[in-house]
Amino acid sequence: MYVLIMAFITIMLYVEPTMSVHISNVLYIHTVCLGFLIAYLAIDYFFTKKHFTKMTAHWNEGIFIPEGVGEPHTYEQHLYMQWFQTINEEHQQKMLTIMQEKKESLEFMTSWFHEIKTPIAVCKLILEQAPSNVDTLSIQEEISRIERNVEQALYFTRTDHFSQDYHIVQTELDKIVRTVVKKHAKQFIQRKIKADIQLDSTQVETDSKWLGYLLSEIIANALKYSADEGTISIHSEEDQKEVRLTIIDNGIGISKSDIPRVFDLGFTGTNGRIYHKSTGMGLYLANKLAHKLGHQLSISSQEHQYTKITIHFPKRLDYYSIVT
């Protein structure tokens, strides 16, 4: 528009016979007008950019906070403000709906998990009193597997609300490990797998209940992939930075290509194609709980030889800052 207006003025100055304007004056007019245009655009850019920068700064994780943005200076800015507020309201409504649906689903699932524990316990009690035979032992084993899967699902639903149920204290690592191994004693005995436990009298800062479940998942995984009459070694070591608890089994191992993904949700890898009962949940939950507790898991393995998982317990952590 500026170019069209200036071109029109220049043409009019030259075609009008009553006007005699020197070329230098025309250039001077153009220069001054261009200077005014640049100044106007610069000022307009500054104020417009300031307003939109303030608006974009009020977006926080998909939520628009209109307070403090200020009044729009132009009709265009007014339309943008209305648009942002509409998007924000729709987003908030969708989030509330999703959160309500998730809450209802979680409450139902938690209630179901607790309800299903009763018939499982009754079935186990009946089987313990029944005459011992191959069928009875097989049913007991399947019920134990159902009980473990229910417990796994229950802990999975609880991890999102971890901060509401944790208590970090100095805990005897040896006591927790031996309690977890005792929990799996029946599988160790049935499959004649040796538990080689070599633990120092070490204390770590953790939550005993959550760490117990974390260890239970790792040991259950080691039992699943260990050969009969094998060995699962559990030992600890300590330095100035951390305490390390290592669980080693001499089972089928993990392929090198699968190791980077073993902690992913639902990943079963090559072994999952051989052992169809793999769910890809155990190590995922263990890793997630380790991070929640401020610990860390590392894994190394060699196919057909061993799998080694180490839990790292860093010293002098501020747990109130990591549990969120």
Image: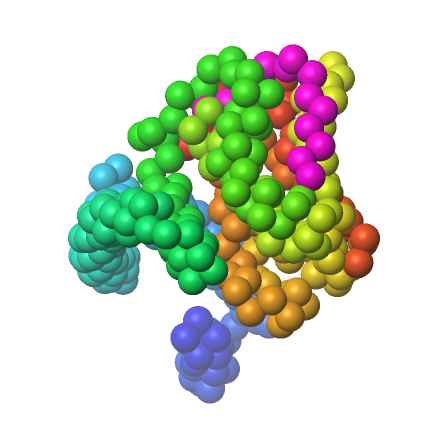
Q: In this view, does 251 lie above or below 11?
A: above
Rendering coords of residue 27 (x, y %): 58, 67
Magenta highlight range: 194-207
Q: Write the residue at 73% across / 58% down.
A: 252
Q: Which colour scheme is used?
A: rainbow
Q: In this view, does 22 lie above or below 114?
A: below
Q: In this view, does 77 lie above or below 177?
A: below
Decide which of 184, 88 is in the foreground and name it.
184
Rendering coords of residue 136 (x, y %): 40, 57
Q: Write the residue at 81% across / 53% down.
A: 305
Q: Residue 206 lies in magenta, yes or no?
A: yes
Rendered-image quadrant of the C terminus: top left
Q: In the displayed structure, does residue 292 sit left or right of residue 310?
A: left
Residue lying at the far front of the rendered structure: 131
Specify the quadrant of the image occupied by residue 299. Answer: top right
Residue 52 visible (yes or no): no
Decide which of 122, 275 is in the foreground and name it.
122
Rendering coords of residue 242 (x, y %): 69, 21
Q: In the displayed structure, does residue 89 sit left or right of residue 299?
A: left
Rendering coords of residue 132 (x, y %): 42, 52
| Helix, strand or loop: magenta stretch | strand
Decide which of 78, 155 is in the foreground and name it.
155
Disc count in the image?
0
Q: Write the residue at 68% across / 68% down.
A: 270
Q: Residue 31 lies in magenta, yes or no?
A: no
Q: In the displayed structure, does residue 199 sit left or right of residue 320?
A: right
Rendered-image quadrant of the N terminus: bottom left
Specify the quadrant of the image occupied by residue 262. Answer: bottom right
Specify the quadrant of the image occupied by residue 209. Answer: top left
Q: Write the residue at 60% across / 67% down.
A: 275
Residue 209 visible (yes or no): yes
